[in-house]
Image (cartoon, helix red, strand yellow):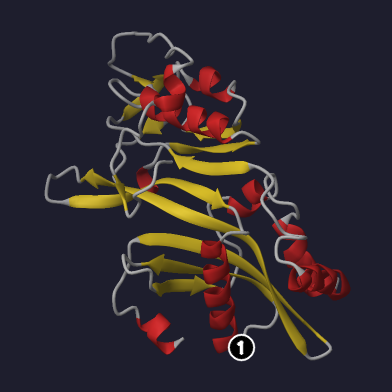
């Protein structure tokens, strides 16, 4: 664990196992409630003096894989090292090119980015219930823990594919209209789309604080999640998703449906060698 915490060789892929802990009759129990993979991309800074790293999307991973097992063991070892006995936590863990794991940081709370509410739509057990049971219903928590001890994945497993997508804007100004909002919201995988509204300032994106919004995607079909993701990224190209004050009014025809499935992400990703 000490080598793990030292971060001697920071990594390649970044993961966030969300854990829940409860102590009953002197026994501390840990559960992996949901697991996320950060996908990032590089963006040139407005002053041209370098690059920043942006979140492209956060992806909910299955918890019944060998990777998940390794991250589960690492996360639980960290919790024991910090003698954490009750509540939620989310260590951020990097895996380097050699497959070694390193801790970036750990937060003793629920993960942000609306991840728990999104996981509630895509996991067998609502993670907010696990958090509540850790304090108010430890017997129920132990029931789930015993099931997982007997067979991993018997109680806690992913039921749908899910992503949180951060919106990226190449231009800034006051929003006159949002021509693609209804189109994106109509997609089967989109359960929530948050954007700066008409009359608000639409920022140029160069970090997490300057994103103009985000989309939450959940569906039984991975293809539908990819379709929604690629359409969002396609709509951000050229003039972007917003008509700004000073623009001549314009419209863009929707992409043919078949083109929304196989198109590649438009921005390079840092630390990710797999297709989304």
Which of 192 and 248 lies nearest the eye of the viewer? 192
In which quadrant is the C terminus drawn? top left
Q: Measuring 35% from the left and 51% from the top, which residue is drawn there?
A: 272
Instruction: Classify residue 83 by image quadrant.
Output: bottom right
- Examine the rendered structure and indicate whether residue 175 appears above or below residue 120: above
Task: Note whether 30 is above or below 64 in the view shown.
Answer: below
Q: Nearer the viewer, residue 99 or 72?
A: 99
Quadrant of residue 262 within the rendered picture: top left
Q: Residue furthest bottom?
A: 26
Q: Is residue 235 above or below residue 152?
A: above
Left or right: 59, with 29 as reference point: left
Residue 63 percent location from the top left of the image: 61, 59
In the picture shown, does residue 249 fall above or below 56?
above
Name the residue: 59% across, 64% down. 18
* Disc 1: which residue: 83
**Residue at the left extreme, as displayed:** 49
- Mark 1 crowdedness (10 Å alpha carbons): few <14, some 14-19, many ≥20: few
Image coordinates for residue 36, horizontal then vertical, percent: 53, 56
Left or right: where 116 falls relative to 165: right
Q: Position of residue 70 (x, y in %)?
A: 52, 70
Could you tell me if residue 199 is visible in this image? no
Would you say residue 247 is visible in this rendering? yes
On the picture, is 224 further left or further right than 272? right
Which residue shows up at 68% across the image and 83% down it? Answer: 85
Q: Residue 90's image quarter?
A: bottom right
How many numbered circles are shown? Answer: 1
Q: What x and y, as percent, mark residue 104? A: 40, 71
Find numbered disc 1 in the image and state the secondary structure of the residue it sits on.
loop
């Amino acid at each position: 664990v000490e080598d793990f915490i030292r971060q001697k060789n920071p990594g390649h892929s970044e993961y966030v196992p969300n854990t829940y802990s409860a102590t009953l009759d002197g026994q501390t129990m840990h559960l992996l409630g949901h697991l996320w993979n950060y996908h990032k991309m590089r963006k040139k800074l407005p002053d041209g003096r370098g690059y920043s790293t942006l979140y492209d999307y956060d992806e909910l991973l299955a918890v019944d894989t060998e990777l998940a097992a390794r991250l589960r063991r690492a996360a639980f070892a960290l919790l024991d090292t910090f003698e954490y006995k009750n509540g939620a936590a989310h260590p951020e863990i990097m895996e380097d090119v050699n497959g070694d794991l390193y801790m970036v940081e750990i937060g003793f709370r629920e993960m942000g980015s609306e991840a728990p509410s999104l996981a509630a739509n895509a996991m067998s057990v609502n993670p907010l219930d696990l958090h509540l049971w850790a304090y108010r219903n430890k017997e129920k928590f132990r029931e789930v823990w015993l099931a997982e001890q007997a067979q991993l994945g018997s109680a806690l497993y992913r039921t749908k594919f899910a992503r949180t997508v951060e919106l990226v804007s190449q231009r800034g100004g006051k929003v006159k209209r949002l021509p693609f909002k209804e189109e994106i919201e109509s997609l089967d995988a989109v359960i929530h789309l948050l954007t700066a509204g008409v009359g608000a300032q639409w920022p140029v994106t160069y970090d997490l604080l300057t994103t103009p919004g985000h989309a939450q995607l959940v569906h039984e079909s991975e293809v539908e999640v990819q379709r929604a993701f690629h359409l969002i990224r396609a709509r951000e190209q050229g003039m972007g998703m917003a008509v700004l004050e000073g623009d001549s009014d314009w419209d863009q025809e929707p992409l043919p449906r078949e083109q929304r499935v196989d198109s590649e992400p438009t921005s390079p990703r840092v630390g990710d060698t797999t297709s989304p």
